[in-house]
Amino acid sequence: MARGAVESAVRRYPFVFLFIVGVLLLTLTRPCFRRIPAPPPKSGHLPEVALADASGRPIDASTLRGTVWVVWLYDAACGAPCDPALDRMREMAGLYEEDHLDAIRLLSVVAGGAPGDSGTPRLLVAGAGAEASAVLAAAFGVASPVPPPGRLAIVDRDGDLRGTYAADKTGFDEVYNRAQHVAGVTR
């Protein structure tokens, strides 16, 4: 297209030209306005409790050290109200897997019950006895037995709690993003 034809098109369709320039400028300036929040502050320490996975192997604080964990604590008698939360845990495990975020793992703790199979290697399922369940519930700021659909927490590499969240859609979205900040993963 010749220079005269471009100038003619700009004069003829100024709003189209301005729209295209605006879209380009908006796209180029977007990274300048992106705010990445700081990781949530430490709100306590994950208590030393006796947990066991589905095959009976113990899970203790040394097992959890060195990795950022998203922990979901729920009561064994929860049933149907906890099914959406379990689906979200599996979905979050899949998203972390797709993004190759190996610094983040997920732990599902069945309070007062025996663990089942998670169906995914990134999601570890553990069972906690009555006493351990009560200690964990207190650390997460909820009553024992844990009300449905449970409670989420982020545990950093040193075993410190980085906040607890409701196990609903908003809580899972919050945990998904904040766990990445705690792990030091930013995109």
Image: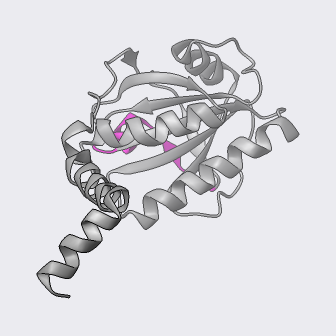
Q: Is residue 62 visible?
A: yes
Relative placement, left or right, of 180 versus 144 is left
Quadrant (top left/top right/bottom left/bottom right) for the N terminus: bottom left
Rendered location of residue 121, percent (x, y): 52, 63
63 drawn magenta: yes
Q: Which residue is drawn at 38% across and 44% down?
A: 63
* Total numbered badges shown on the rendered structure: 0
Q: Is residue 79 visible?
A: no
178 drawn magenta: no
Relative placement, left or right, of 110 versus 183 is right
- The residue nearer to you, when weighing 38 against 53, is 38
Rendered location of residue 166, percent (x, y): 62, 25
Highlighted range, magenta:
55-67
Rendered location of residue 20, percent (x, y): 31, 61
Eyeballing the image, is 150 above or below 105? above
Residue 99 occupies quadrant: bottom left
Residue 14 occupies quadrant: bottom left
Q: Which residue is drawn at 34% across and 43% down?
A: 180
Eyeballing the image, is 72 above or below 5? above
- The residue nearer to you, when weighing 34 against 84, is 34
Q: Residue at x 42, y 40 (%)?
A: 177
- The residue nearer to you, when weighing 39 against 53, is 39
Rendered location of residue 4, percent (x, y): 15, 79
